Image: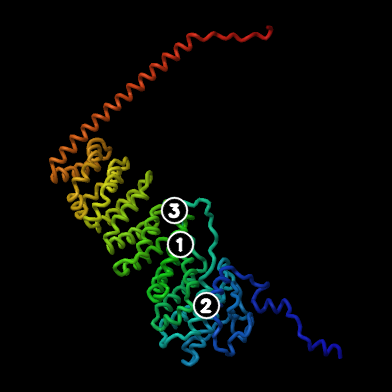
Amino acid sequence: MIKQILGRLPRKPSKALDNREYGGSSVPHLNASSARANDFVSSRPNTSPPGPDSNTQEGSSHGSKPNQVSNSKVYRNSVAAPYEALPGFRDVPSSEKQNLFIRKLNLCCVVFDFTDPTKNSKEKDIKRQTLIELVDYVTSVNGKFTDTLIQEAVKMISVNLFRSFTPQPRENKVLEALDTEEEEPSMDPAWSHLQIVYEFLLRFVASPETDAKLTKRYMNHSFVIKLLDLFDSEDPREREYLKTILHRIYGKFMVHRPFIRKAINNIFFGFIFETEKHNGIAELLEVLGSIINGFALPLKEEHKLFLVRALIPLHKPKCLPMYHQQLSYCIAQFVEKDCKLADTVVRGLLKYWPITNSSKEVMLLSELEEVLDATQPAEFQKCLIPLFRQIARCLNSSHFQVAERALYLWNNDHIENLIRQNHGAILPVIFPALEKNGCHHWNQVVQNLTVNVRKIFVDIDPEMFEECLRQFQEDEAKAEEIKQKHEATWKHLEEIAATKAASSEAVLVPFKVPSRTS
């Protein structure tokens, strides 16, 4: 009788049962990135339609269906038993396709460990094939996605993509560009699955069947922030996908546009003023290039502040070569949109002009040419004095590429016309540099280019050129006279010092070392 009563009492689940539920020998640990992804997913209640394949509680499985990832927790590297492929979309009637779509999404919410290629190889192949089927379904579907389908799709995307990267040593905050280029990029071992998930996200966002008003509730600010965090991935293939997807999201969800710009702004601030280390600056700037190109005129004050506070200071880090091409395009877009910004940009470039980094000087001179090519005479006059003082220093650079690149500015017709119109203010500033280069620079190409530039000024205003030459000769004579006086003074001081030293030696009394006996 007692045994019958005890037999009816509920038993505590055994460890073996727990292990069978999670498909492993121990309870899977909760990854931090999984928790972050699930926070986004669990922000809304689960609206999946009940059915024989719906999970009633976390970790439960029904028949041949794998464990679904619940809305409260996401388990990574866990496989339900059994993990089996679901039927194809062609094998079910149209009325069952949406339900099958949800089941396939839930099947793909299990994330595998790719550090061991031999682990769960069969299940990995099943998931990969299922992901491919999901991509095909999203591409060919007719009819708007429902609220439930959108929620489940975003959940699957979040579980697979939002993860923490392996922390990298950042003792040296500043990385030299050449050192960075020599490093081999780190390729994600899970890319065979990640690539298809990214393709699914791209097709899902671009699909005309995806309603922006419904989807924005799930692809919210939290989703955007986590997507932007992925730009720090070392895998260039991942950053390329992210760049395209972010552009699509920016175009489709107008309500998110200010937030996306602000979030990118914050990434730049952290990069410029804190770490100087981020893998996705070039890709983010490439997206911004398209965004800036679409700015309406007149430019908002917010956009001008973004130029001054974020884009121009991006010239400061030493790893500028890694993203300079994209940055230069963004800067040029601003000047083309509003020519009055040319003075602000030129002065900003001069503020961050390097002193000893020749390769960086060459890049800034190239960027300066693009900016000046879009500059109008009124704005050019505002900044020409500090601008040509810097150009004069570049002309006198012992690094031939810097001097050569500065002289190439005169090959641009628009810049040459601006110089011709303002030669009266420019020639006195750069004449000494031109005269010294033409006579004393060690590189023959630089000398030849200098002669060509001098001829331009002679043709424009020969009288002024002669006046500058006379003034230069007078200044050189005065400088030589001052130099001789300094040399004479130093020679006189040396003679006095030598005389005093000799007299001091003459009056010294010899010191006799006492013997040990005394």
Is label 1 or label 2 in front? 1
Residue at the right extreme?
1
Badge 1: residue crowd in 10 Å (few <14, some 14–19, many ≥20) = some
Badge 3: residue crowd in 10 Å (few <14, some 14–19, many ≥20) = few
Query: Residue 178, position in %: x, y?
Result: 42, 51
In the depicted structure, whether residue 63 falls above or below residue 395: below
Which numbered disc, 3 or 2, marks the residue that appears first in the sequence? Answer: 2
The secondary element bearing badge 3 is classed as: helix
For the N terminus, the quadrant is: bottom right
Q: Name the amino acid type tagged 3.
A: Glu
Badge 2: residue crowd in 10 Å (few <14, some 14–19, many ≥20) = many
Residue displayed at 25% across by 40% down: 433
Q: CA distance from mark 1 to mark 3?
A: 25 Å
Q: Name the amino acid type tagged 1.
A: Ile
In the depicted structure, whether residue 323 falls above or below residue 107: above
For the C terminus, the quadrant is: top right
Quarter of the image for residue 208 reads bottom left
Badge 1 vs badge 2, beta-carbon distance below 8 Å: no
| Residue holding disc 2 | 155
Task: State the colouring used for the structure image.
Answer: rainbow
Which numbered disc, 1 or 3, marks the residue that appears first in the sequence? Answer: 3
